[in-house]
Amino acid sequence: MDFTVVVPTYDRPVELAGCVAALAALDYPADRYEVVVVDDGGTAELAAALRPGPGRVAVTLLAQPNRGPGAARNAGAGAARGRWLAFTDDDCRPRAGWLRGLAAALEGAPELLAGGRTCNGLQANVYSAASQRVADAAYAHFNRDRAQGQLLASNNMGVWREAFLAAGGFDESFRIASEDRDFCDRWTWGGRRIAWIEGAEVDHCHALTLPGFLRQHYAYGRGAARFHRRRAQRGSGRLWQQLSFQWQWRELLLRPALASPRPAAALALLACWQAANTAGFLREALAKGSEP
């Protein structure tokens, strides 16, 4: 078997159903990939969400106590039968050629971590669009050299299973956010390579409200503080090297916001993002405690 697609989920059966349907419709032979869904301590009934249709891809459900998405992904990787792992999230819809794009990059390259473009699947949602704009800016900054990248999000990531396990998988102490940033940093620090590739695209359908947007980026700020603390402990980089992204407003954030359909709202949400992210970062940096 080529791929095991790992999907962590927590009480989002409607979103999960859309993800499983998209995975069942991939342009890839159904007998050469499987889907492993890991229920991270949720209470929602998931049976209906896991029915991709007769004769389609095999879907397996695992359950664990609530330990966070990193632990859920590790559990899925531990149960995988595929030689390659492909990670996505329950609110994502991989496009038809997703696995073919990952396979083309991974074949013969066991030291490669590969991922493609993630797109906002909810164009009418101004908060989802703003969040995607920040993610796009981060990718553009940290992956300027697409063949020697630094960052991939765990909603669009492919890797050899044995190499993933040898690298230690995701750090399960990152229960809020940034477990993917930490994994990418450990991956390159260990001499391996990251590539941001063409042809492996995922639509992210995360419906946000203003409170949800603020909570999301507050959590990202907390995860970033923990990430930088771990990075300093292992000596794999310095804080200022990563914070340089925040200083490139004009090129990476301001111009795309002004070019958006609702520039005033986009600019206001960029300010909200910066405030929420900074507040979360400072909260975690000052507390230096464990994540709940």
Image: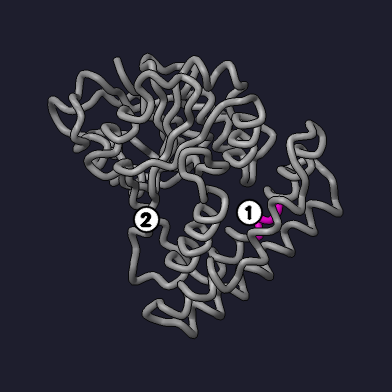
Of the residues shown, which amino acid type is indicated by label 2?
Cys
Which mark is in front, 1 or 2?
2
Q: To which residue does mark 1 refer?
A: 220
**SS type, badge 2:** strand
Determine whether label 1 and label 2 are within 8 Å by CB: no
- Farthest bottom residue in view: 264
For residue 292, side relative to residue 178 (left or right)? right
Q: Tell me if residue 220 is in the magenta stretch.
A: yes
Question: Residue at coordinates 26% horizontally, 45% vertically from top-left?
Answer: 95
Question: Residue at coordinates 57% horizontally, 73% vertically from top-left?
Answer: 250
Q: Is residue 17 visible?
A: no
Q: Is residue 192 visible?
A: yes
For residue 114, side relative to residue 284 (left or right)? left
Looking at the picture, how far across and down is residue 288, in whole percent? 84, 46
Q: Tell me if residue 283 is in the magenta stretch.
A: no
- Please state the extent of the stretch shown in magenta in the rendering: 218-222
Q: Residue 34: which quarter of the image?
A: top left
For residue 109, side relative to residue 239 (left or right)? left
Q: To which residue does mark 2 refer?
A: 119
Query: Is 102 in front, or is 141?
Result: 141
Query: Is 73 in front, or is 193?
Result: 193
